[in-house]
Image (cartoon, coloured by chain):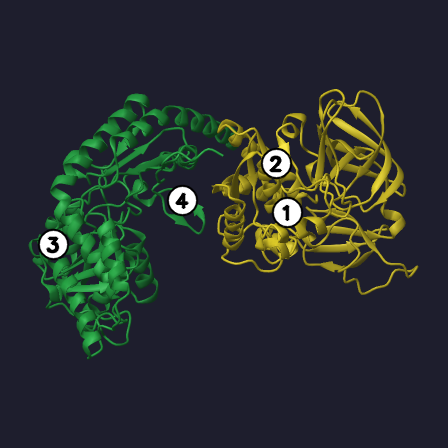
Chain colours: A yellow, B green
Amino acid sequence: MKVLAAMSGGVDSAVAAARAHQAGHDVTGIHLALSRNPKSYRSGARGCCTIEDSNDARRAADMIGIPFYVWDLSERFHQDVVEDFMSEYSEGRTPNPCVRCNEKIKFAAVLDRAVALGFDAVVTGHYAQLETGTDGMVEMHRAVDHGKDQSYVLGVLTQDQLARSMFPLGDSTKDVVRAEAAGRGLFVAQKPDSHDICFIADGDTAGWLRDRLGAGSGAIVDTSGEVLGRHEGTFGFTIGQRRGLRIGKPASDGKPRYVLDIEPVSGRVTVGSREDLAVDELVGIRPRWCGTTPATELDCTVQLRAHGDGHRAVARVIGDEVRIELIDPASGVAPGQAAVIYAGTRVVGSATIATTRRRTPV
Amino acid sequence: MSAPPPVAYFDHAATTLIYPEVVDAMVAQLSRLGNASSLHGSGRAARRVTEESRETVAAVLNARPSEVVFTSGGTESDNLAVKGFYWARRSADPRRTRILSTAIEHHAVLDPLDWLASDSGAEVELLPVDSNGRLDIDALRTAVDRDPDSVALITVMWANNEVGTLQPVDEVVSVAARHGIPVHTDAVQAMGQVPLDFAASGVDALTVTGHKIGGPFGVGALLLRREVELVALLHGGGQERDVRSGTIDAPAIVGFACAAEVAVKGQPQRAPALAALRDELVDGILDVIPDAQLNGAPGAGRLPGNAHLSFPGCEGDSLLMLLDAQGIECSTGSACSAGVPQASHVLLAMGKGESLARGSLRFSLGHTTTRADVVRVVAAIGPAVQRARAAGATSAQGNRA
């Protein structure tokens, strides 16, 4: 097959491209320029937005022996990912920009362009496994390396997208991938993993949002409405967050307090106990199914944040919504995040969490 | 694995194949001992070949040998001229803070101008060009007449590197001469393509470089009138007329001189042959893609080896990749700023829209170009444009969504 390997400059995408090449595919490497004002050098472990990362990707492509180009998707990325990220936060939700990027950029803008240019598929270094099911449909499963599994951020991919994707690393652990990179002479073998949000260079998400959306300071209240303190902006908070609340006054029961709710307009942040956080039902909107839409209720496992645990649940598709009843209650579920629905290791689909219902109403 | 197809190379404006006689001359010189600044026999031998090379370069460009300052290439020559003139002229008269140039200069001129503006108090005026990319000489005249005493320098390229349009350097010189304003011109693309006569041109400084004319990388020259004083960029031994320091690179200079001789002496025969092939290429492409547009001046108004075309609805990057995959090498002609391809400032200055500017390719022909190369492009361009348009349509859709 003629395939396009998206190369970030990191070790995973380099090994993925090398494996596709070794498997006999006609591979072309591309680096996606996503930042409108890229910095020259990496600082810390954010891996995709600097000239240095682009050069690392180019050198990896040289060593693998494949052609390499830079595709400028900075405008699309800004519109579809960065602006969406800001508007979601401004409405009190907690978006996952990697999910959004996969949905709108890597497996949409890039894949569409690749197909139009004559490529059959896009190869990435994501940790997830693709298999062809008995019905001929492509199934996506969790990676062998559960610690690295990235099926959550790919849960938005539809059957058409999966049928044109290749994830050559899904059957390997990260250690194996690093060792293989070293064995292949790829100098990125020891490059640190990327973390955090690629377009926030210093990792200070709250500061980044404050600079763009204003402070939005407000009161911190408990579930009875008593004001416990003030904060400098709602963007510092995510539902379920415990650290950094800086409330002078201890709770009467002496237990730690967690963010339960954020109201972006009034700036009010409600805090409460861990028990108050427990959620046993949620509504997801904009569902995306990897295969056919589940017809009836589905016994499943749902994952509610990247690297989060799976919760046993029952999902029901009602119109354009998915109602998910959690058998194992979840704690700190943030609207805006993706709820990814699994049947065993297989990804069934996903939806964006719109509302949650707590056992203890706030 | 089957052998890759031979490359059809259409990027001679980026760099061109070194002439075999240049390689021979350089290899011979590389194994000779001697620093041209040393006083002993080996030093004198290195000095001798350097001065012979200087005489050769001077002769083919009709300059005096003492007017040839060897540098590391086009970028250094442009920096030396732009900064050196500005500093020297302003220190002679502090009113001289303006630099007049064009909106279509190479970044080796534009970036020093930006830097002088932000760091040295220069007031830079980039004058407009017409839709063919030719300087609006009336705009230059008006800018000079507004306050001639404040102009430190005028710098206007001889021929544009992207669209190939020749600039009215003779008219620039006559505007400047009335007020004694020095003129620099970047003639990197012009050398070997069109006749260049330094003495007759009337310019005070002229940039040329080796690797664009079949010589080596890393060597070039600034032709500089004898009476002109410049402030140096590189201070040290003062080897080149005290305006350029650095140990004399005799093998590179020998190679540059050899290439200069071959390129300039062959120019009268090569230029019409290149222009004929170029016209065949343009006509062939326009036949297949009727809505493609040739950018730049027509006919004798442009470099004979330059064909620059816009393909509406395409991303130049997509086209380049599709052609590259078939061994056809060209350029999007755009500056690669910070790793991200930007729409060309030249096309924007010519009034082309951003999307047309991004959907453009530069095919530049040179001494190795054959008719078979041209035929390959004409055969490949139709399907490539079709594909690139389909890819362009997907991005347009995404943008609307």
Give whichever of B106, B121 is nearer the camera: B106
Mark 2 or mark 1, which is nearer the start of the sequence?
Answer: 1
Residue B36: x, y in percent?
22, 72
Quarter of the image for the C terminus of chain A: give it. top right
Write down the chain letter for disc 4.
B
Q: Name the residue under label 2.
A: A23
x and y percentages locating residue A297 in the rendered image? 85, 24
What kind of residue is marked 4? Answer: Gln
Which numbered disc flags the more N-terminal residue, 3 or 4? 3
Residue that mark 1 sits on:
A12
Label 4's element?
loop
Amino acid carrying label 3: it is: Val
> Marks 1/3: CA distance?
55 Å
- Name the residue located 78 percent from the left edge and 45 percent from the top edge: A146
Picture layout, residue B122 above or below residue B14: below
In the rendering, at what x and y percent does residue A113 appear?
A: 51, 31
Q: Are the residues under marks 2 and 3 on the same chain?
A: no
Distance from label 1 to label 2 (Cα)? 16 Å
Q: Which amino acid does label 2 sit on?
A: Ala
The answer to whether B133 appears left or right of A333 in the picture is left
Q: Which of marks 3 and 4 is in front?
A: 3
Is B144 on the left-hand or right-hand side of A236?
A: left
Tag 2 near tag 4, CB within 8 Å: no
Disc 2 sits on a residue from what chain?
A
Q: Could you tell me if residue B198 is visible in this image?
A: no
Which one is in front in this view, the residue at disc 2 or the one at disc 4? 2
Circle 1 packing at 10 Å, graded few (<14), some (14-19), many (20+), is: many
Residue type indicated by callout 1: Asp
**Residues flagged by tags 4 and 1 on a common chain:** no
Mark 4, other Cα within 10 Å: few <14 / some 14–19 / many ≥20? some
Q: Name the residue under label 3.
A: B60
